[in-house]
Amino acid sequence: CIHSLTLCCVEYPMSLTRLLPQIILKLSQIMSTSTISIHILEFLSLLVTLPDLYSNFVEDNFKRVLGISIQYIQYHMGNSNNQQNTQINQVYLQYVLNMAYQVISIWLTRIRASDQPKYVPFLVRGLLLANKGRSSLDEQTITCLDMISRYSFCDSDSVLPSWDLIKDKLFTSNAMLGQSSYWIFGDTIIQINLSKTGFGEVKIRSSSALTTLVKRIEDYNADLPKPNDPEETEQDESTLKIKINETNYLDIHQSMLKDAIAKYKGPGELMQSKTDISPLPRPKLHQIIQPDEGILRGISVLDRMPTVDFHKIGVVYAGPGQTHEKDILANSIGSSNYQKILHSLGNLVRLKQLKGTYTGGLDTEMDLDGKYAYSWSDGLTQLIFHAATLMPTRLKYDPQCNAKKRHIGNDYVSIVYNDSGRDYKFDTLPGQFNLVNIIITPLFEESNQTDQISPNANDSSFEQFKPNLNEIFRVETQFRSDINHLSPLVNAKVVTGPSVAPLVRQVALNCSIFTQIYLKPNNYSTNWTERYRQIGRVKERVSSSPMSPTSQ
């Protein structure tokens, strides 16, 4: 039944929109095994990617969606230490918990920003009740609370849109005014820099983000000249430095710090202000006096840790009559409908010199793995698609296509467009890490058109690459024999062209999360959790160094 609802999301959106509030209400009343939990949470994870379906949601509807996840967190955290749980049950339990936190995070970001604070007391209370009886909060709870505070209370107006383009000019070593100051506030590390250009920068490092707030120094001292004045000269910069020294630049640091903390509430502060349930004391503020090399190195490591989770998905095209690995990997082009679906999976990106986008190991210097790839992001997760047809085929030098298999063979999940005319066998592309295949099979006669998408094409020319509503496909998942089946495609579904990409992409993402947990059942952690642990290491280092408590 839930699998049918999932299919209706993409196939019958208009009909489902009218019934969705009642459906969510019914789902909120179901509390059962982890097996049912998985399917409900996967349904919600697909639904959030289709905003037209819930465009008429009101506060109660959103609360029910968030409440479903909270229910499962409360229920499954209460059973996590059950001695009767087998290792495989622990894997599914951890997957349910991870999906529940993910559903909360992504749904909150889809609520209108001005309305998000209204949901904070509801979320905080539910998450704290899930941790009832524990000596400390669960790591995922802390990182989720940090995300809630960041989205609900951070002053986004203080962040300059083009900050990445100008920060290197404003805060070069020559432009710095005095030393940076570092502070510990709960589970965040705050750094404040002042520049001779008249700007101040506040960096708030937390488990879920690195938030940069930009302030004008003149806001904290009316006697200072305005920044970026066209008439400003080097002499003016010297005057600015003298005036700041006269007022004590540390006082300005502390004023900026106080202002930033007032706008950015960490998890501990969030609990104090929004609910009477508080297993943690109010966070304390400490200044790090003379941070040593170890502390600065720890902060540098934190800055290199991603604030989103990464997943890589293989994509291959099996042409007519092709059943062998070499033939499939050697394809440098596919059918017209393969191209349409591939294009609908994400955004085409140029790999050379690509920055800020996860590539899953694809070369970004010399086009060794092709010029282009498809990438997708929802703000909390990045997907990269390793499409074999976009990678160079060099049969003379690489007859077995090992260069392509080096990437696709290490992807836990692969999407296979099966145009072979035969059933696709799971081990067609054998590999140690090949755990899940998502098979797309056209149920109509393919045209012979094999046009590649032009990377330089404008948006209007992409219309020809949209899947056709009259074309239908059979879509199904295959799992390695030691994995119990999950996903709404465990039984083959017939899907129309426009629905294939959004459905397959979300199933691929969910399967990728599951396989990562499956392979590391006792060591799996999100990037947010890893950042939280790194902040803890920095705090441990700080505890053995001089620091002075500062009252707010």
Image: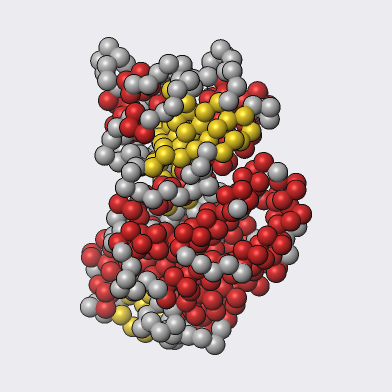
Quarter of the image for residue 93 reads bottom left
Q: Between 22 and 104, which is closer to the camera in this rendering?
A: 22
What's the residue at 40%, 84% (across, down)? 133
Horizontal side of 424 relative to 199 (left or right) equals left
What's the residue at 68%, 30% (across, down)? 469
Residue 407 image point, x, y percent = 33, 33
Horizontal side of 364 relative to 262 (left or right) equals left
Residue 409 image point, x, y percent = 31, 34
Q: Between 475 and 307, which is closer to the camera in this rendering?
A: 475
What's the residue at 53%, 35% (across, down)? 475
What's the residue at 47%, 73% (across, down)? 75
Quarter of the image for residue 56 reads bottom right
Q: Can residue 255 be seen here?
A: no
Horizontal side of 444 relative to 387 (left or right) equals right
Residue 361 image point, x, y percent = 33, 38
Residue 243 image point, x, y percent = 49, 70
